[in-house]
């Protein structure tokens, strides 16, 4: 578990005080593809697991960094196809 080396680093795993740069570095160095592997090498994600979403984002960003992005998203007519879970929590008055 490496402490942050600069004040600019963000602590991602609060339980083990692991920074974003440390996590990203281990993902890049080991070409890691699973949160469990990140936890094995640096401890991040091994506590309360609230950082798992960010760790997965870092993994996805690393592995998708060389792939081309779609040129343009399809145009939408603005209609709602299917209401999601947030529509229940944030319904209009």
Image (cartoon, rainbow, N blue to C red):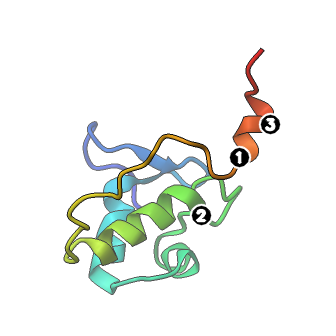
Q: Residue at 33% of width from left, 66% of height from top?
A: 61
Indicate which disc, 2 or 3, sits on the residue closer to the N terminus.
Answer: 2
**From the image, which quarter does the C terminus lie in?**
top right
Which residue is most to the front? 77
Q: Count of labels shown?
A: 3
Q: Is residue 62 above or below residue 54?
A: below
Residue 91, position as x, y percentages in the image: 76, 26
Residue 88's tag is: 3
Q: Foreground: 82 or 43?
A: 82
Indicate which disc, 2 or 1, sits on the residue closer to the N terminus.
Answer: 2
Q: Foreground: 5 or 21?
A: 21
Q: How would you rate the neighbour count of disc 2 (Cα within 10 Å): few for under 14, some for 14-19, many for 20 or more?
A: many
Q: Is residue 34 left or right of residue 2?
A: right
Q: What SS does tag 3 mark? A: helix
**What residue would you read off at disc 1?**
83
Structural distance between the alpha carbons of marks 3 and 1: 8 Å
Q: What SS does tag 1 mark? A: loop
Tell me, yes or no, whether the two marked residues, 3 and 1, touch with CB atoms within 8 Å: yes
Q: How would you rate the neighbour count of disc 1 (Cα within 10 Å): few for under 14, some for 14-19, many for 20 or more?
A: few
Indicate which disc, 3 or 1, sits on the residue closer to the N terminus.
Answer: 1
Q: Nearer the viewer, mark 2 or mark 3?
A: 3
Q: Is residue 90 above or below residue 18?
A: above
Q: Is residue 45 above or below residue 26?
A: above
Residue 45's tag is: 2
Q: Residue at 50% of width from left, 66% of height from top?
A: 56
Structural distance between the alpha carbons of marks 2 and 1: 31 Å
């Amino acid at each position: 578990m490496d402490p942050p080396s600069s004040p600019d680093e963000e602590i991602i795993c609060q339980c083990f005080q692991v920074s974003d740069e440390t996590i990203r570095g281990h993902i890049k160095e080991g070409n890691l593809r699973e949160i469990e592997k990140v936890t094995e090498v640096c401890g991040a994600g091994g506590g309360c697991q609230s950082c798992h979403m960010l760790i997965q984002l870092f993994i996805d960003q690393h592995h998708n960094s060389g792939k081309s992005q779609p040129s343009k998203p399809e145009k939408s007519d603005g209609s709602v196809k299917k209401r999601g879970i947030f529509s229940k929590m944030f319904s209009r008055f």
